[in-house]
C-alpha cells in the first residue's frame, strides 16, 4: 500500500499509509476537536485513496495534505507523526512500576503526609505516582473520619459501588458472610476475582485501634510474576493461560467471573493479577492441565506467603493505606480487640485517567 514517505532529521525513515492518514485527519468534517472524537465514516473512505498533494510546511513542524474526497490543506503535526513513526500498541501498563520484595522496597518512598498529598496538583501527582511505582502508598496524619475517604476518592475519581456498598466503615463482625470481616488472619489475595471489572484501588483508613495484631500485609504480584517467569517459566505460563473462576455467594448475591492469574497486555507485560484462593469456584480441567494448575498456584501462593516477600505494617489512627488491587495482593494478620476501619474502592481506569490528566498527556 502506498503512503507518505517521511525522512526525519535524524535519518529515520517512516511510511504513513494514505488510508491511515485520511483516517487521522483533523479537519472539522473528519474530527471534532471539542470532544476529541472522530467524525469521519471510515468505512466510507475509498480503500485505494491517495493524497492529491502533500506539502511540508515551511517551518518543518507539520505536513499539509489535500484529499480527493473533500478536505484540503489538512494539517498533520510533526509531533503526531513522530509519535506514530513505528507501530507501538497503546501502552496501558506503566513503565514506572518497580517490582519489590520486603528486602528491596524503598519503604520511605511509599509514605507521605496527607496534607502534602492533598495540598495541590503537584502533591496529588506525587501521591498517585507513588502508587504507580510501588503499587501502594501510605498517607500519614489523615483525619480519621469517613468523610476524608470520600474526599480523597473524589480527588482521584469516584467511589466505586459494590455489593458491600460504596463507602464503608466496619469493625470485625462475625455476622457478615465475607472473610474480610472476621478477626482471623487473611492470606494475601486480590479482591473481587468474581467481578469482571475488579476494583482498581482500595483505600483503607484506620479510624480506631484498640487491639493487638491486625497488621496489613502487602505482596507485589509483579515480583511474584518476575520470579516465576525467571525460575519456573512453565508455572508462569500456566498462570497466564488458565482462566480461573472466582465466585461470591451470599447476601442474595451470586457473582462469577474468570480470568487467568496473570493477564497480559499486547506487549506481554502483566496488566492485572487476580488471585484469591478463598473465592476460587469449583472447576475441573483435563487431568494434565488440572495438575499443572495446582502446581502453578502452589508456587504462586508459596511466594505470596514467603515472609521476605511481604511488606507488613500496623495501621494506626490517621494512617491511610491505598493500594492497587490489580497488582498487589493484600492480607492481614490476626488480631484481638477492636479495630475500626473506613474505606472504599475506586476503578482502575479512573486512577489511570487522573494520572494522564495531571501529566497533561494528549
Ligand atoms: Fe481483601
Image (cartoon, rainbow, N blue to C red):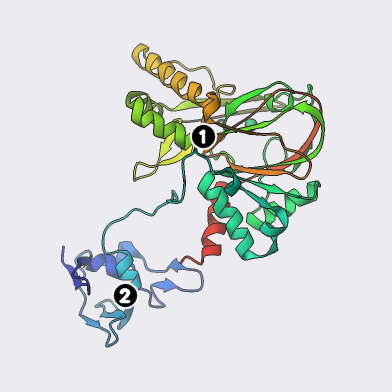
Q: Quadrant of ligand 1?
A: top right
**Image side of residue 77 versus residue 114, left or right:** left
Tag 2, which secondary structure? helix
Of residues 57 and 304, the one drawn nearer to the viewer in this rendering: 304
In the rendered image, the vertical position of residue 79 relative to residue 296, given as above or below: below
Residue 52, percent from left and from top: 20, 80
The N terminus sits in image quarter: bottom left
Q: Nearer the viewer, residue 196 or 344?
A: 344
Relative vertical location of residue 27 with respect to residue 137 in this rendering, above or below:
below
Within 10 Å of disc 1 (Cα), the crowding (few <14, some 14-19, many 20+) is few
Residue 94, horizontal then vertical, whole percent: 45, 50
User: Neighbour class for label 2 at 10 Å: few (<14), some, many (≥20)?
Assistant: some
Q: Specify whether 55 is left or right of 182.
A: left
* Corner quadrant of residue 55: bottom left
Identify which residue is drawn at 21% across, 69% down.
49
- The one of 234 and 3 positioned closer to us in this rendering: 234
When the figure is inspected, residue 260 is found, relative to residue 268, above or below; the finding is above
First along the sequence among labels 2 and 1: 2
Q: Is mark 1 within 8 Å of ligand 1?
A: no
Residue shown at the point (22%, 63%) measured from the top left: 47
Point out the residue furthest to the top here: 287
Q: Residue furthest left?
A: 2
Element at badge 1?
A: loop
Q: From the top left corner, tell me how far across and down residue 95 is, in percent.
A: 42, 51
In the picture of the structure, the residue carrying the numbered disc 2 is 78
Regarding residue 74, the answer to whether it shows in the image is yes
Q: Write the residue at 25% across / 66% down.
A: 19
Residue 287 falls in which quadrant of the image?
Answer: top left
Mark carried by residue 103:
1
Amino acid at each position: 500500500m502506498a503512503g507518505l514517505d517521511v525522512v526525519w532529521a535524524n535519518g529515520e525513515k517512516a511510511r504513513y499509509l494514505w488510508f491511515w492518514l485520511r483516517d487521522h485527519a483533523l479537519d472539522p468534517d473528519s474530527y471534532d476537536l471539542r470532544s476529541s472524537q472522530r467524525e469521519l465514516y471510515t468505512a466510507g473512505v475509498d480503500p485505494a485513496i491517495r493524497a492529491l498533494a502533500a506539502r511540508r510546511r515551511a517551518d518543518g513542524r507539520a505536513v499539509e495534505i489535500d484529499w480527493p474526497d473533500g478536505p484540503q490543506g489538512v494539517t498533520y503535526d510533526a509531533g503526531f507523526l513522530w509519535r506514530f513513526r513505528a507501530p507501538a500498541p497503546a501502552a496501558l501498563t506503566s513503565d514506572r512500576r518497580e517490582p519489590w520484595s520486603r528486602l528491596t522496597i524503598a519503604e520511605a518512598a511509599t509514605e507521605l503526609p496527607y496534607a502534602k498529598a492533598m495540598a495541590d496538583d503537584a502533591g496529588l501527582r506525587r501521591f498517585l505516582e507513588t502508587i504507580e511505582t510501588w503499587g501502594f502508598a501510605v498517607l500519614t496524619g489523615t483525619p480519621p473520619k469517613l468523610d476524608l475517604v470520600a474526599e480523597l476518592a473524589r480527588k482521584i475519581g469516584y467511589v466505586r459501588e459494590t455489593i458491600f456498598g460504596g463507602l464503608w466503615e466496619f469493625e470485625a463482625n462475625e455476622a457478615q458472610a465475607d472473610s474480610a470481616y472476621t478477626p482471623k488472619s487473611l492470606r494475601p489475595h486480590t479482591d473481587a476475582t468474581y467481578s469482571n471489572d475488579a476494583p482498581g484501588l482500595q483505600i483503607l483508613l484506620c479510624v480506631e485501634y484498640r487491639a493487638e495484631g491486625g497488621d496489613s500485609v502487602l505482596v507485589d504480584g509483579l515480583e511474584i510474576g518476575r520470579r516465576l517467569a525467571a525460575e519456573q517459566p512453565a508455572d508462569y505460563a500456566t498462570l497466564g493461560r488458565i482462566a480461573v473462576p472466582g465466585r461470591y455467594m451470599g447476601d442474595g448475591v451470586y457473582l462469577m467471573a474468570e480470568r487467568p492469574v496473570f493477564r497480559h497486555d499486547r506487549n506481554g507485560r502483566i496488566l492485572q493479577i487476580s488471585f484469591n484462593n478463598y473465592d476460587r469456584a469449583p472447576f475441573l480441567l483435563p487431568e494434565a492441565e488440572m495438575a499443572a494448575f495446582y502446581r502453578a498456584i502452589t508456587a504462586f501462593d508459596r511466594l505470596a506467603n514467603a515472609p521476605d516477600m511481604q511488606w507488613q505494617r500496623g495501621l494506626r489512627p490517621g494512617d491511610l493505606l491505598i493500594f492497587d488491587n490489580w497488582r498487589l495482593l493484600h492480607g492481614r494478620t490476626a488480631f484481638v480487640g477492636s479495630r475500626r476501619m473506613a474505606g472504599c474502592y475506586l476503578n482502575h481506569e479512573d486512577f489511570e485517567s487522573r494520572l494522564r490528566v495531571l501529566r497533561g498527556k494528549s
